[in-house]
């Protein structure tokens, strides 16, 4: 049984691409300069970019990969015509033919991460205060974990 395609998914333009098979020693800065010099500056026609540098090993080489999200489909088609099948050379002279394809996941990450509401509130927790900050009394075994300095002081008192 196949699911029907939602109307929202079919009307959203696909603007995110993956550029694969880039040289493993190609740095992000060099790639961004090459893309910017061709007229695809990040912020103007490219809204979001992510670059993962590959690894060059003797047995297995992992190529670099770039993810780009364009402002509109026209910019995507221009980029694909310019860089699709383009040859990039690494420092040793090996040539890598770049491929430009639609990204399988078209969503783009949010701009800034959300702040955790619980961050910085442990000092206000009464259980934390009683068990770890100001443990009073002599009940070492019932308390479980306790600060080492307090347990050392309480050991003679508890043993008697």
Image (tube, grey):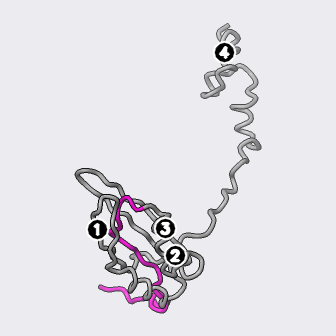
Residue at the image point whose x is 52% and y is 82% from the top: 39
Q: Which residue is disc 2 drawn over? A: 36
**Callout 2–callout 1 Cβ contact below 8 Å:** no
Which mark's residue is nearer the viewer, 4 or 1? 1
Image quarter (top left, top right, bottom left or bottom right) of the C terminus: top right
State how far apart marks 3 and 2 are (Cα).
Answer: 14 Å
The dot on residue 152 is 4
Q: Secondary structure at mark 1?
A: strand
In the image, 54 versus 153, the foreground residue is 54
Spatial separation of the CA atoms under disc 2 and disc 1: 21 Å
The quarter in which the N terminus is drawn is: bottom left
- Looking at the image, tell me whether mark 3 or mark 4 is earlier in sequence order: 3
Which residue of the protein is positioned furthest toward the left in this rendering? Answer: 59
Q: CA distance from mark 3 to mark 4?
A: 53 Å
Residue at which label 1 appears? 95
Q: Give the Cα separation between the discs numbered 4 and 1.
A: 67 Å
Q: For numbered disc 2, what is the local secondary structure?
A: helix
Residue corresponding to mark 3: 50
Magenta-colored span: 1-26
Name the element at disc 3: strand
Say if 103 sits above or below 118 in the image: below
Residue at x 30%, y 69% (from the top left corner): 96
Q: Position of residue 101 (x, y in %)?
A: 36, 79
Q: Are marks 2 and 4 in contact (CB under 8 Å)?
A: no
Along the line of sight, which residue is nearer the eye, 84 or 110?
84
Q: Nearer the viewer, mark 1 or mark 3?
A: 1
């Amino acid at each position: 049984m196949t699911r029907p395609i939602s109307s929202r998914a079919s009307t959203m333009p696909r603007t995110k691409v993956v550029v694969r098979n880039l040289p493993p020693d190609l740095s992000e800065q060099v790639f961004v300069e090459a893309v910017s010099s061709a007229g695809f500056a990040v912020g103007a026609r490219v809204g979001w970019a992510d670059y993962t540098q590959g690894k060059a090993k003797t047995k297995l080489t992992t190529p670099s990969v770039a993810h780009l999200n364009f402002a509109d489909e026209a910019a995507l088609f221009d980029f694909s015509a310019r860089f699709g099948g383009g040859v990039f050379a690494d420092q040793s002279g090996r040539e890598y033919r770049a491929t430009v394809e639609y990204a399988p996941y078209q969503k783009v990450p949010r701009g800034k991460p959300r702040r955790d509401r619980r961050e910085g509130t442990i000092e206000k927790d009464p259980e934390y205060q009683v068990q770890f900050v100001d443990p009073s009394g002599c009940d070492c075994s019932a308390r479980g974990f306790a600060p080492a300095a307090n347990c050392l002081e309480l050991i003679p008192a508890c043993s008697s």
